[in-house]
Image: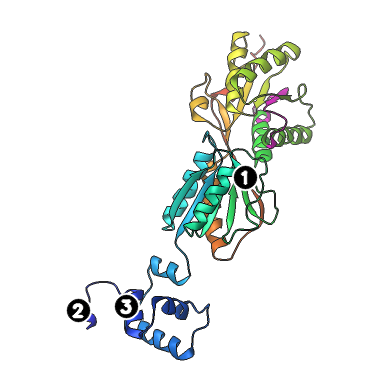
């Protein structure tokens, strides 16, 4: 009989041979619910007789799973959310999971609607992607499935959250500037109410303190824009013409700074070295000189968040806010200053 079978054995075949429902086979094989001993033995005997080996779908049925996850984003622009989502989707594809993507566009009411919709589709878990690294309200407390937060951490320390290590990323940038011989370093960044801006400023402070150096001027806080980069450059170069390096809290700010510095006759990187943040290729690869920048590795962050959602679905959650390391991408804007000409 087995020799004539032309298709893989299914859970339905086991149920038919044992004379029970598919649900009973699931209960008997996963061992998590009470089934009469006689029934369980009959199911196990049928599975052995048919050489039943559950495939991914059958295993998910046995575990009461749908092999479907929800990705819920609030990043309506997508500048940071899209790389995180791509990394998560890549991990889910490798794990043979179907993905349902919902964009709440920063609207709390829309977000609640999508949560209800995803739960109605019986997703096994959720990844919530924020639009900034500022903590966001937890949605985990009343949900029947595990939730992992990516980029924007949950405000509940018992949740599982993944964020880029902005303090560490800024430290990479400033240590690099010091390694190129710069000693008069200034910092221009985004608004004070953004955690990313204050974290990056903290990274600058730590490294300069370690090196026994004073920052040139106060940290200049403003918008995440090229316009602010230009305005800050005017202010900085007027009040601190001695500056020989600037770490900018975003590539947009860095692009604006470079534009104004060149207009004011400064040679980059000979006079001033510049480092940006985000490694946004549309800017970092288009500035002149090419921009050294900190890459927050958002795709890897999304991939890691997805892997931890798998673990949480299996009951192995890792609570807390996990900071993921960044990477410095070195380009022309931080070449070492030229050596002084030898004396005759």
Q: Are marks 1 and 3 in contact (CB under 8 Å)?
A: no
Q: Nearer the viewer, mark 1 or mark 3?
A: 3
The part of the image, by quadrant, that contains residue 336 is top right
The residue wearing badge 1 is: 163
Q: Is residue 192 magenta?
A: yes
Residue found at x 42% / y 79% = 25
Q: Are marks 2 and 1 in contact (CB under 8 Å)?
A: no
Q: Secondary structure at mark 1?
A: strand
- Judged from this view, the residue extending furthest toward the left is 4
Q: Is residue 256 magenta?
A: no
The residue wearing badge 2 is: 4
Q: Secondary structure at mark 3?
A: helix
Left or right: 13 in relation to 139: left
One can see residue 82 in this view: yes
**Position above or below: 185 against 22:** above
Residue found at x 24% / y 81% = 2
Relative image position of residue 319 (x, y in whole percent): 66, 57
Which segment is the magenta one?
A: 178-195
The residue wearing badge 3 is: 13
The part of the image, by quadrant, that contains residue 146 is bottom right
Dot 2 or dot 1, earlier in sequence: 2
Towards the viewer: 3 or 72: 72
Q: Are marks 3 and 2 in contact (CB under 8 Å)?
A: no
Neighbourhood count class around disc 3 (C-alpha, 10 Å): few under 14, some 14–19, many 20 upward: some
Dot 1 or dot 3, earlier in sequence: 3
**Position above or below: 284 against 142:** above
């Amino acid at each position: 009989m087995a020799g004539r079978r032309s298709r893989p054995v299914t859970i339905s075949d086991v149920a038919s041979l044992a004379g029970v429902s598919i649900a009973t086979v699931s209960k008997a094989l996963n061992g998590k619910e009470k089934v009469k001993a006689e029934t369980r033995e009959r199911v196990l005997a049928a599975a052995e007789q048919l050489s039943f080996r559950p495939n991914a779908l059958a295993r998910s049925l046995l575990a009461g799973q749908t092999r479907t996850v929800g990705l819920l984003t609030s990043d309506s622009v997508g500048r940071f959310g899209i790389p995180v989502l791509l990394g998560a989707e890549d991990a889910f594809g490798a794990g043979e999971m179907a993905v349902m993507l919902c964009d709440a566009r920063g609207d709390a009411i829309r977000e609640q609607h999508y949560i209800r919709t995803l739960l109605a589709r019986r997703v096994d878990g959720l990844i919530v992607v924020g639009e900034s690294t500022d903590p966001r309200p937890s949605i985990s407390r009343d949900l029947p499935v595990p939730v992992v937060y990516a980029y924007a951490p949950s405000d509940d320390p018992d949740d599982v959250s993944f964020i880029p290590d902005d303090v560490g990323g800024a430290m990479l940038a400033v240590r690099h500037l010091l390694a190129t011989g710069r000693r008069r370093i200034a910092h221009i960044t985004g608004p004070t109410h953004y955690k990313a801006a204050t974290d990056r400023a903290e990274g600058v402070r730590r490294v300069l303190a370690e090196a026994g150096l004073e920052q040139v001027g106060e940290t200049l806080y403003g918008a995440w824009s090229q316009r602010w980069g230009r305005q800050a450059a005017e202010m900085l170069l007027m009040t601190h013409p001695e500056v020989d390096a600037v770490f900018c809290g975003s590539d947009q700010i860095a692009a604006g700074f470079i534009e104004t510095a060149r207009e004011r006759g400064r040679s980059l990187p000979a006079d001033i070295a510049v480092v940006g943040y985000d490694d946004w290729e549309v800017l970092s690869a288009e500035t002149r000189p090419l921009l050294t920048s900190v890459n927050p590795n958002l795709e890897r962050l999304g991939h890691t968040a997805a892997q931890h959602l798998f673990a949480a679905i299996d009951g192995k959650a890792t609570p807390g806010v996990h900071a993921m390391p960044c990477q410095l991408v070195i380009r022309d804007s931080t070449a070492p200053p030229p050596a002084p000409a030898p004396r005759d």
